[in-house]
Amino acid sequence: MLKVAKKYILAFSKESQNKIFEAIAEAGSFEIIESQGEAKEEDVLKNLQTADYRLATMDFAISYLSPFIKKPSFISKFKDSKILFSAASLNYTGQEKVFQEAKRIEKIEKELDILNKEEKNIQNNFLELEKFKGLSFLPQDTNLTFFSVIAIAKTQQAKLDLFIKENKLFQKPLTSLGAKEIYLLAGLKENKDKTMAGLKVIKGEVVFYNFEQSPIQERADLRTKAKENGRVMEALKQELSLMAKKIGSFKLYRDVLEVEKINWEIKSKTLFGGLLDYIVFWGYEKEVKKIKERVFLSAKGSHLIEIMPEKGEEPRVILENHKLIRPFQYVTEIFGLPKPGEVDPTPYLAFFFILFFGVCLTDAGYGILLIVFTLLPLIFLRKKLGDTKLLRLLFYGGISTLVMGVLFGSYFGSTTQTLQKFPFLYKTY
């Protein structure tokens, strides 16, 4: 019969560590695959930071995608109220793909933020250019003439007209903004300082032109830039809309990361310098019951939990048969143990193996020698030998060889006719 081991985790207080190890040693049939001492603190902290970083990334991605998610109908909500999960639905490759998409969302957010700032600057520049609406050239001084754009309250219009007439200036109305009028003034360059001083008296303000090209050219460039930014923003939003259709995978991986983070937090808080220790091991039900009784009596507060094997991890197996068939397990072990869920071939091969063993030798004399030289160690050296499966197998083989030798009349390579020369042996056989 094939016995399949199960995977367990045993948590206990550090004070009970020695008692736990003694109980495991006495129970036997265990394979410890992980213990607290094998884990390095820096590895745990690194994994915790990674899980925390990925979880924060997924939270941001899910939150950022929410405006792009189409609202489901009532029927679809009722029909698909939960996200179905299977082990194959989000493997390692799938997780990495979802995480890279979340990183892409972060990058898109930064790109959209830059584009929105540029859009705001474009709008501000359009508003600034409104002050120079009627201006068709770049207002800059020449060798003989100065040009200046000024803003003055409408209530000061009469004073401005008088000021222009007295100083022989050229004026051109550009636009009107609220309670102020915007004008372009031009005059002799040699009188510029005097003109600027006079403007302050009538409460006129100089409006500086902070662009490199004429207003017409600036507006054209701003329109082109705004159109290009709008095209890029629309493409990025369409990409986000496509990703929003996969929101289920994002939420699923986010929950997986949250569980991972909790596990690493527990390890970091309890295993390093904490009060708990743990062992992960393979064990068989019979032996696990023994250790459970021993542990719970000697180490109170301990907890033994059966856990699922990891993906690709095969449970350990041993062969357990009746004591008469047990020696034949040696043959099965030579060819390899069966996998979990397969049949133990030992009971089926036992009869045929011992039959053909006797047929191959077919000598009563050899059979007697095998019986004698295997029976003596089994009687007198049993405790020292420990595992006696091979000796018992040869003992059974000796019996089979003796029977076949008698049936076929072979004794130490001779027939019964040869034995007639030795009356004592002949009468015996």
Image (tube, rainbow, N blue to C red):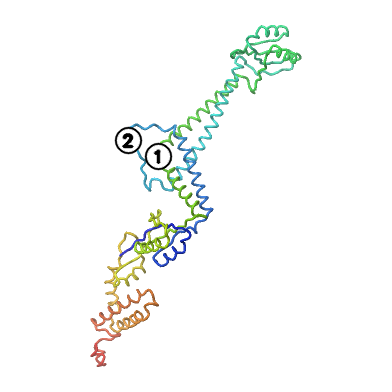
Q: Is residue 182 left or right of residue 325?
A: right
Q: Is residue 174 left or right of residue 265?
A: right
Q: Amino acid at mark 2?
A: Phe
- Quarter of the image holding residue 159? top right
> Where's the C terminus, which quadrant?
bottom left
- Name the residue that disc number 1 marks: 248
Q: Residue 259: horizontal and vertical position, in percent?
A: 44, 47
* Label 2: element kind: helix
Which of pointers 2 and 1 lies earlier in the amino acid sequence?
Answer: 2
User: What residue appears at the point 40 percent right and 62 percent down from the top-left corner?
Assistant: 295
Q: Is residue 353 left or right of residue 59?
A: left
Which of the labelled discs sits on residue 78, or is there none?
2
CA separation in Å, label 2 and label 1: 16 Å
Front in this rendered view, residue 184 or 421: 184
Quarter-of-image position of residue 142: top right
Residue 53 x/y as whole percent: 51, 44
Look at the numbered disc 1 and give the secondary structure of its residue.
helix
Amino acid on which disc 1 is placed = Gly
Residue 417 numbered tag:
none
Label 2 vs label 1, nearer the camera: 2
Question: For this view, does 400 lie left or right of residue 186?
Answer: left
- Of the 4 image quadrants, the one containing the N terminus is bottom left
Residue at image coords 64%, 17%: 137
Looking at the picture, tell me which residue is in the foreground, 369 or 216: 369
